[in-house]
Image (cartoon, rainbow, N blue to C red):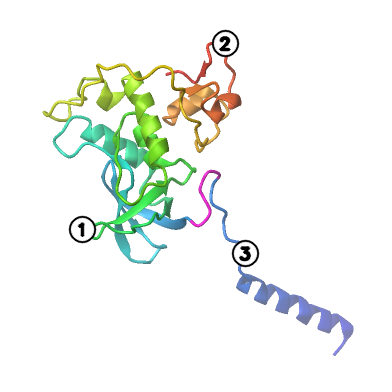
Amino acid sequence: MTPVLRASLLACTAVLTLPLTAGPAAAAPQGVPKGAQKVVVVKIVDGDTVDVRAGRTGPVFRVQLLEVDTPERGRCWFRTSSARAAALLPVGKSAYLLKDRDPKDRYGRHLRYVWGATGTFVNRHLVRFGYGKAVLYKPNDRYIALMRAEQAKARRDGLRIWSGGCDGTGSAPAPSPTRTPAPQPTPDPPSTGTDPRFPTCGAANAAGHGPYRRGTDPEYAWYQDRDGDGLVCER
């Protein structure tokens, strides 16, 4: 065999074997904690319930989002909260699930904290922007302090279910925005800073994020506070 022919055969062998080499797995987006399970969204049931598939061809199972309770069908803000969940967890896109202590409820639903394909902590987002209430599913309490703090902000701002109004999608009254003022001397607890980073506040708002407060939300430093009021990405 001539040197030229030997070189040609070696080159062909390399080309044929190249596709058999597995490439590196795609990294989870920023904000998703280590150990989260990657799944594919199959169906949005309501604001706090979603069906997912384990891999492209794996079994489908139902997930109940931990530490958040959105309005039930027939109540005010049901469609709005369900639509927000659908925007954060598009069907056919990836999502990331994290367990707590008790993995299932009595109905067989998988209890999970959920992050969307862009890294948004969905449970937290729904509470922070008034799409649902913070609720403790004992013994799953990993983020309950954060959820209650985010609920206090949404309630103070009168967002959605805390607005005292209805979005026109249900007949039941929405929760009243508290008439008892929140304790003022206690500062807001630190945020975990899990929101995605956007090039502008306009882009953040369009994706359903903001506002951010100086000294409370790490995301505040990402944007310019033009009026110096300690608040960025106001809606």
Q: Residue at x 20, y 26 (%)?
A: 175
Q: Amino acid at mark 1?
A: Tyr
Q: Which residue: 43% across, 53% down?
A: 98
Task: Check contact, mark 1 vs mark 3: CB within 8 A.
Answer: no
- Residue bounds of the magenta highlight: 30-35
Q: Point out the residue furthest to the bottom here.
A: 1
- Judge depth for marks 3 and 2 and give the one in front: 2
The image quadrant that residue 109 belongs to is bottom left
**Which residue bears the numbered disc 3?**
23
Q: Nearer the viewer, mark 1 or mark 3?
A: 1
* Cβ atoms at labels 3 and 2 below 8 Å apart: no
Mark nearer the N terminus (1 vs 2): 1
Of pointers 1 and 3, the one earlier in the residue sequence: 3
Q: Position of residue 44 (x, y in %)?
A: 29, 47
Residue 69 percent location from the top left of the image: 27, 40
Residue that carries the numbered disc 1 in the rendered image:
107
Real-space Cα separation, disc 3 to disc 2, in angstroms: 48 Å
Question: Label 2 neighbourhood size at 10 Å, few (<14), some (14-19), many (20+)?
Answer: few
* Three-letter code for the amino acid on which mark 2 is drawn: Gly
Q: Is residue 150 above or below residue 37?
A: above
Q: Quadrant of the C terminus?
A: top left
Main SS type for the magenta part? loop
Which residue is depicted at the point 53% across and 11% down? 229
Count neighbours of disc 3 (C-alpha within 10 A) and say few if under 14, some if 14 to 19, many if 20 or more. few
